[in-house]
Image (cartoon, helix red, strand yellow):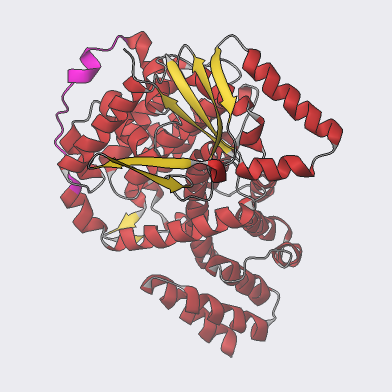
Amino acid sequence: MKYLLQIYSDRAAAEFERLSEDEQSVVVGEYLAINQSPAVIGGEQLQPAETATTVRVENGQTILTDGPFVEAKEHLGGYLLVDADDLDAALEIAARIPAARMGGAVEVRPLVER
Amino acid sequence: MVSYVGDFDLAEEAVQEAFAAAAERWPRDGTPANPGAWLTITARNRAIDRLRRNRALAEKTRLLEMPEAVEDEMKGTIFPDERLELIFTCCHPALGLEAQVALTLRALGGLRTDEIARAFLVPEETMKRRLSRAKRKIKDAGIPFRVPADHLLPERLAAVLAVVYLIFNEGYGGRGDLAAEALRLGAALAELMPDESEVHGLLALMLLNDARREARFEGAELVLLADQDRSRWNAGQIARGRAALDRALALPGRGPYAIQAAIASLHMEEPRDWPQIAALYGELVRLTGSPVVELNRAIAVAEADGAEPALALVDRLELDGYQYFHSTRAELLRRLGRAAEARTEYERALELAHTEPERRFLRRRVAEVSH
């Protein structure tokens, strides 16, 4: 089954900034290791939510809004796409993502099977 | 002396329920920043709930009377060796607690949806939606149907035991059919996981507490342990509970359930072995860091070593506003002949008391220490 691991890392990013250089490189190493695990089939880091542009089309007119669609304290900071045996396997990968223990969170969503 | 046991029997039961809640929540939400305070607050809330429940007990039992015959539709489709996988699926922490409980009763207890709805006082439609949402999530999110891997097992097993204990406590509060259901689930788990100490510990705890069910109420009024008619205790069930406790203690890794069962067992002996009870509470304090458990330890210490050392323990606790803290402190002061201080504490406990029998008892105490 495929799962999207949505990484909410705003708070974790602040935490990351407070780390020493050595500690930061450990965290970066962890992200690289997760990206290389066989179950992970895709994933990227996003630019901050302030860079977002929201698009709606009403009566054929494209309406653009500067900023994210949902005003929230926490925004999506990145994602991983994983192909795992079951939810437990996906949850284990999610729990290894450093943001999850650094004040952020990871939302695990199954993809619709086609 | 016995009358003062009164308050703490109730306090102790409130603590047990707080554990049930903690055991369920902590694996999911992580241990709260201040587990002691959390347990205190929960224990207090549970005590209040319990007292409210007791008042309306007679009415509720009538309301919740369930038919004896329970359809076996789902059980029939499950092979015995699949029950274990099934309970881990039903109690998966990715499901909400209410869903876990409902699924477990439906799939393993074989209760019908309308029966579960009635047990939890929600409309059948609500329960139907809750169950079908949970089943959909199991399927669509890929919640596995298997016993978790070893490194996940302790946490997942804790979640399973918490669900069973929660069902039991719903039943213990008056819904006897749910308690019986929890006992059946506990016995099945002990059969399926014979090497897990806490599984036997939970079964022992439930059997020992349930053995006193008949003696716990006089009409709608709670009867405290020391005043209970022992001839109404279920001797066969006590024996089964103690056998389960022996198995739990013989296995490595004894935890809060086994220790609570050991305490429950000691409380049913006459005379009570207070030094041993105090030691077990000490073990429970080390496992939980709970001030409410420490208060219970102090009560045992008072019986074992006297009021002075017990008061020293109590005075270190930050439980202001917790009724049983004040009533315990009052009792210890009274025993030490410090009547004026005892009176102040009894009055504080009286302000916090929620039931008329408790208020009557405390008023009597205030009058006694006032001469």
Chief secondary structure of the magenta portion: loop
Reply above or below: B61 against B324. Answer: above
Tell me if residue B232 can be seen.
Answer: no
- Location of the C terminus of chain B (image quadrant): bottom right
The magenta region covers B64-79
Question: Does the magenta run of residues contain B78?
Answer: yes
Residue B139 left/right relative to B247 = left
B247 over B102 or under it: above or below: above
Residue at 63% across, 17% down: A35
Q: Residue furthest bottom?
A: B371
Determine the residue positioned at 76% across, 65% down.
B312
Q: Identify the residue shown where x is 40% and y is 36%.
A: B235
| Viewer-proximal residue among B116 and A109 | A109
Q: Is residue B118 left or right of residue B272?
A: left
Q: Left or right: where does residue A37 sit relative to residue B359?
A: right
Position of B240 relative to B211 (above/below): above
Which quadrant holds the N terminus of chain B? bottom right
Q: Position of residue B117 (x, y in %)?
A: 21, 41
Q: Position of residue B71 (x, y in %)?
A: 15, 24
Task: Give x and y (percent) for residue B296.
Answer: 61, 55
Q: Residue at x 47, y 81 (%)?
A: B363
